[in-house]
Image: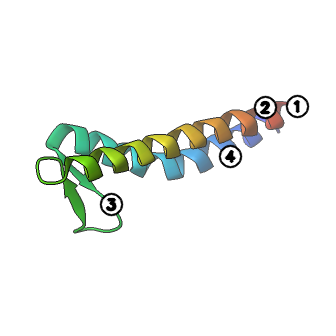
Amino acid sequence: MVALRVAVVVACVALVAWPVAHAMLAGLRTGRLPHTGNRAELVRSERPVGFWALMAAFLAMLALLGYGAVLGVQRALA
């Protein structure tokens, strides 16, 4: 039962973290950071401050998701 709880917590966090991490890696690789839809993107060469601000926001979101995952796993194991 504990393993199922841990698996559910990890799956829920991964469901949200995967697209965010994918967008960040694509942005670092190509210089175009997708956001809010299929066509919206920030280009690093055109708007560098906005690009890095959004990258920082995505990084903060991933950090909070990681923190939530740790708390969820700790609660599942308790």
Read off the residue under disc 1. Answer: 78
Q: Is residue 49 left or right of residue 9?
A: left
Q: Quadrant of residue 3?
A: top right
Residue found 32% across the figure and 49% down from its top: 23
- Between the C-alphas of marks 1 and 2, the distance is 6 Å
Question: Which label's residue is closer to the chain start, 1 or 3?
Answer: 3
Label 2 Cα neighbours within 10 Å, binned few <14 / some 14-19 / many ≥20: few
Residue found 54% across the figure and 37% down from its top: 63
**Looking at the rendered structure, which numbered label has been put on residue 8?**
4
List x then y, in percent, for residue 18: 44, 46
Of the pair 48 and 39, the residue shown nearer to us? 48
Question: Which label's residue is closer to the chain start, 4 or 3?
Answer: 4
Residue found 51% across the figure and 52% down from its top: 16
Quick one: SS at disc 3? loop
Question: Which label's residue is closer to the chain start, 1 or 4?
Answer: 4
List x then y, in percent, for residue 77: 82, 31
Amino acid carrying label 1: it is Ala
Q: Quadrant of residue 76?
A: top right
Front of the two marks 4 and 3 = 3
Quick one: SS at disc 2? helix
Label 1 Cα neighbours within 10 Å, binned few <14 / some 14-19 / many ≥20: few
Amino acid carrying label 2: it is Gln
Q: Are marks 1 and 4 in contact (CB under 8 Å)?
A: no
Quick one: SS at disc 4? helix
Label 4 Cα neighbours within 10 Å, binned few <14 / some 14-19 / many ≥20: some
Read off the residue under disc 3. Answer: 35
Front of the two marks 1 and 4 = 1
Farthest left residue?
45
